Image (spheres, rainbow, N blue to C red):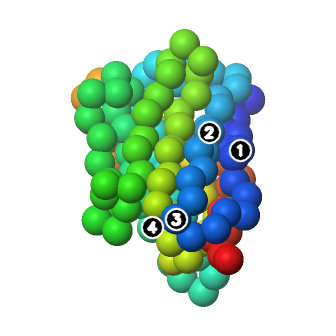
Amino acid sequence: QLQLVESGGGLVQPGGSLRLSCAASGFTLDYYAIAWFRQAPGKEREGVSCISSNGGNTNYVDSVKGRFTISRDNGKNTVYLQMNSLKPEDTAVYYCAGRATRMVNFCDYAMDYWGKGTLVTVSS
């Protein structure tokens, strides 16, 4: 059974940092592009960042550029999202998602497998 499990969410003050993890079970992430999405209350889900299967290509939504960093450790079968300088508007449920691809340097936001999400709350 293919599963993606997010962890690392929580409550943080504005300006603080969190690192989210997306761990895969039942399959290896080596051939999967992975993306992080978020959905804030009352808003549509948006793609935040993606990373190619070889880690060589990344993409960020404008609102998080310079603050968030996506990375992956295929040896640990895990993808990370380091979030710095957090703002209240970053509050959302964060999801990771994956899609198998032969294009090792490609990432986008069209995904096949989804985790259940982890809540990030930025508040003083």
Q: Residue at (34%, 33%) from the top-left corner?
A: 52
Q: Mark 3 points at which residue?
A: 15
Residue type, mark 4 in image: Glu
Q: Residue at (64%, 68%) from the top-left corner?
A: 13
Residue type, mark 1 in image: Ser
> Which class describes the residues within 10 Å of circle 4: few (<14), some (14-19), or many (20+)?
some
Residue situated in front as seen by the camera: 23 or 108: 23
Between discs 3 and 2, the one toward the N terminus: 3
Q: What element does badge 3 sit on?
A: loop
**Mark 4 or 2, closer to the camera:** 2
| Disc 3 from disc 4: Cα separation | 22 Å
The N terminus is located in which quarter?
top right
Q: What element does badge 2 sit on?
A: strand
| Disc 3 from disc 1: Cα separation | 20 Å
Q: Mark 4 points at which residue?
A: 46
The answer to the question of whether label 1 and label 2 lie on touching residues, with beta carbons closer than 8 A, is yes
Between discs 4 and 1, the one toward the N terminus: 1
Q: Residue at (28%, 65%) from the top-left corner?
A: 62
Label annotation for residue 21: 2
Q: Name the residue under label 1.
A: 7
The answer to the question of whether label 3 and label 1 lie on touching residues, with beta carbons closer than 8 A, is no
